[in-house]
Image (cartoon, grey):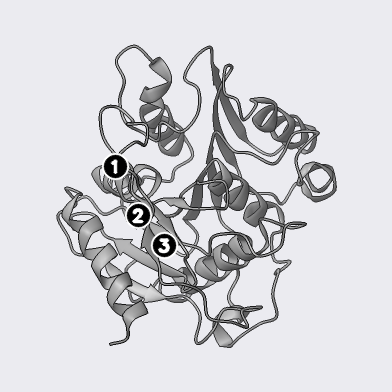
Amino acid sequence: MNLKQFAMCSIMFGIMATTSLAATPTILNIWPGKPPGETKELPPEVDLTKDTDKLIAGKRIIKLGNVSTPQIAVYKPEKSKDTGASVIICPGGGHHILAYDLEGTEVAEWLNTIGVTGIVLKYRVPFRDPEKRWGAAVADAQRAVSLVRSKAAEWNLDPKRIGICGFSAGGETAGLTSLFLEERQYTAADDIDKVSCKPDFAILIYPGGFDTKGQAQIRVKDKVTKDTPPMFLIHAFDDPVTANNSLALAVELKKVGVPTELHIYDAGGHGYGLRLVNTLPITTWPKRCEEWMQRRGLLKMP
């Protein structure tokens, strides 16, 4: 085991020790070798959390940096609860870091309680291309969707109920993965890339990148079609990553008749994940999302 592998294992052990998930996840590299476009060795993966960082609901955040080996961590619910639905989770972090527990493992934990397999995507950060900050992240997300669908029978998943969820920059990643449909942002690596990379539904929590100032704005108008998967969106009116991101996307989805649910709360700011704050109704969004998934038939037992 080299230094880079040792560092990655140490970080993952620390993450698992800080969560209350009952099962040990299945962890897979998503690419057969180096990810597309990677030509040089990067520093070892590291937790960049500082003692001076702002606490969220009284708790720290694990901030993963220097991610160059994209992986998925698959958390299965109890067998008696398992609906067969699954959600690939894209943590946020401005394409600089990944808020791996706040917007990753804690989301998988919640999904498990409602019978859904939570699959945390550790995508590449920091961004590689300043003109297309989302490029590596979306490639990793598309590959993850194909990989999960290729494993559906092995993991007892419904290949037609594979969703994607993202927060902030991860929301941009999940949103673009949904908008691109089968238009891969990389050259196929192997037979896994013959499997569809289109999510069946999307859950976007305070996403960035879709308003008139965002990199993705033109693509929203160009890419939203009747084939775009159904979406659930959450934003706060006082979010510095403006609620216009969710509004702009919802307007285009409405034009073509894609089933969409949008909640905009008056307060909440940004980066709360699903940590409950009694004074902020927005932090009850997981219940609204569960209700939406129920109505969409996504939580039916097999």
> Which tag is nearer the camera, tag 3 or tag 2?
2
Does the CB distance between marks 3 and 1 fall below 8 Å? no
- Identify which amino acid the numbered label 2 is placed on: Gly
Kindly identify the residue that appears in the image at 19 percent across and 52 percent down: 21
Estimate the spatial distance between the alpha carbons at disc 2 and disc 1, rounded to whole Å: 8 Å
How dense is the environment of label 1, judged by Cα within 10 Å: few (below 14), some, or many (20 and up)? some
Residue under label 1, please give it: 110
Instruction: Answer whether residue 86 is visible to the viewer in this image.
Output: no
Q: Which residue has dot 2 on it?
A: 118
Q: Earlier in the sequence, mark 3 or mark 2?
A: 2
Q: In this view, does 152 lie above or below 118?
A: below
Question: Disc 3 vs disc 1: which is toward the camera?
Answer: 1
Residue 158 is tagged as 3
Task: Tell me the element at label 2.
Answer: strand
Q: Label 1, secondary structure: give it.
A: helix
Let me know if residue 82 appears in the view.
Answer: yes
Could you classify mark 2 by the number of other residues whose Cα lies within 10 Å: few (under 14), some (14-19), or many (20 or more)? many
